[in-house]
Amino acid sequence: MTEVITNEMFFRKLKPGKRYIPLLIDVQENKIKWLDFEQYHFYEGFFHKSINLFFALKKEQVDYVVTELDILLDDRVSEGCLYPTGFIFHAGRSGSTLLVKVLSRSGKNHIISEAEPLNSIWQYFAANKLTDSDKRKIFTNLVLTLGRSDNRHKNYFIKFTSFNILFFQFIHHAFPDVAAIFMRRDIDEILKSFGKKLPGWLQSENASFLKTIATIITDDPRTMIQCFFEEASKYSPEILMPVEYKNLNSDLLPIILHHFNVKANESQLNQMQKQFLFDSKVEFNQKKFDPK
C-alpha cells in the first residue's frame, strides 16, 4: 500500500465531488484503501470488474488514499452516504449476477457486488479482539461508505459473496430494517456450474480462510451449499425472501422490487427487464442469454 494518511486528513479530503469508496482491506496491517470513483456508475456484475474498468477508463490516473482501519469507528466517515435499500444473498450460481446487472440498468440504482472489503472484514474480526459494539460500528460504516454516491442514485443494493449468508444474523442485526433475499438453485445444477469454473471462495488458497472465519470444516462443495441453505431457512420470508433460480425472469422483477420497497416507473422497469435477454457473465450485452 501507499503512504498512510491520518484520519483527520482523510476527513478533510471528503468534500463535495469526492467519492471515496473502500477498495480493499489489509488485514495484516489494519489498513483500508479508498478509491475516488468520481461519477462512475457500476454496471458490471462484480466489484473487481468495476475497478478494472474504472482503471482502464482513467488510464490508471486515479485518486486513492490509505488510512488506518479504525477510521470506521468514526461516524464522520459515512456522513452523506446512501443507506442500503436491499441485500442480495445467494448459494452461488443462482442468478444473483443476473439480478445485479438487471438492477444496474437503472441509473438510480447504486450496486456493490461481492466487494473484497465485505469479505475480508470477517477475517479482520476473527484476528482482532473487538467488542460486539465495535464490530457492529465498523461493519455498519463499511457498508455505508460503500454506498458513497451522488444525487443520481436513490437506491443502494449490496450483493454479498455466497458464504456471507453464514453471517446473516450479524448483518441483519446491524441493518434490521433492510430487506433481503436469498437466491437458491438445485444443488446439482450449482455443482455442475462449479465444475466449469470454481468460485473464488472455493479455490484451494481460500480453504483456511473459510475455516477460520466461518467455521467451515469441510472442503466438500455440496456440504457447504447445504450449510448455506440451512442458514437461510432459519429466517422468515419477510426477513429473507427466497428466490428460486428457475423462477427468475422479467415477470418476477416487480415482486423483487416490491420486497425491496422500490418504486420504478414504466420506463425504468422496462429498461431493467431488458437485461434478462442477455448472458449475465458477459459485459455490455454482447451475448444473448441461453438457458441451456
Image: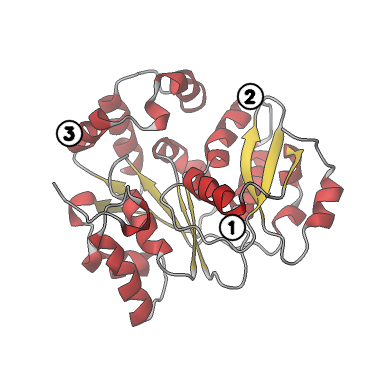
Q: Amino acid at mark 2?
A: Ala
Question: From this viewpoint, is residue 234 visible?
Answer: no
Q: Is residue 160 left or right of residue 66?
A: left
Task: Check the image and report above or below for 176 versus 151.
Answer: above
Q: Given the current orientation, which residue lies at the most extreme left position?
A: 292
Q: Position of residue 151 (x, y in %)?
A: 61, 73
Comparing marks 2 and 3, which lies closer to the viewer?
3
Question: Alpha-carbon neighbours of circle 1 within 10 Å: few (<14), some, or many (≥20)?
Answer: many
Q: Residue at x 42, y 30 (%)?
A: 201
Alpha carbons under labels 2 and 1: distance apart: 26 Å
| Residue bearing mark 3 | 188
| Residue bearing mark 2 | 127
Question: From this viewpoint, is residue 166 visible?
Answer: yes
Q: Given the current orientation, which residue lies at the most extreme bottom position?
A: 266
| Residue bearing mark 1 | 147
In front: 29, or 176? Answer: 29
Q: Quadrant of residue 100?
A: bottom left
Q: Is residue 31 left or right of residue 116?
A: right
The local secondary structure at tag 2 comes to helix
Q: Is residue 47 left or right of residue 93?
A: right
Question: Alpha-carbon neighbours of circle 3 within 10 Å: few (<14), some, or many (≥20)?
Answer: few
Q: Residue at x 43, y 20 (%)?
A: 207
Q: Is residue 242 left or right of residue 121?
A: left
Q: Amino acid at mark 1?
A: Gly
Specify how the rendered protein is coloured: secondary structure
Callout 2–callout 1 Cβ contact below 8 Å: no
Q: Given the current orientation, which residue lies at the most extreme front position?
A: 59
Q: Amino acid at mark 3?
A: Asp
Q: Position of residue 210 (x, y in %)?
A: 46, 25
In front: 95, or 230? Answer: 95
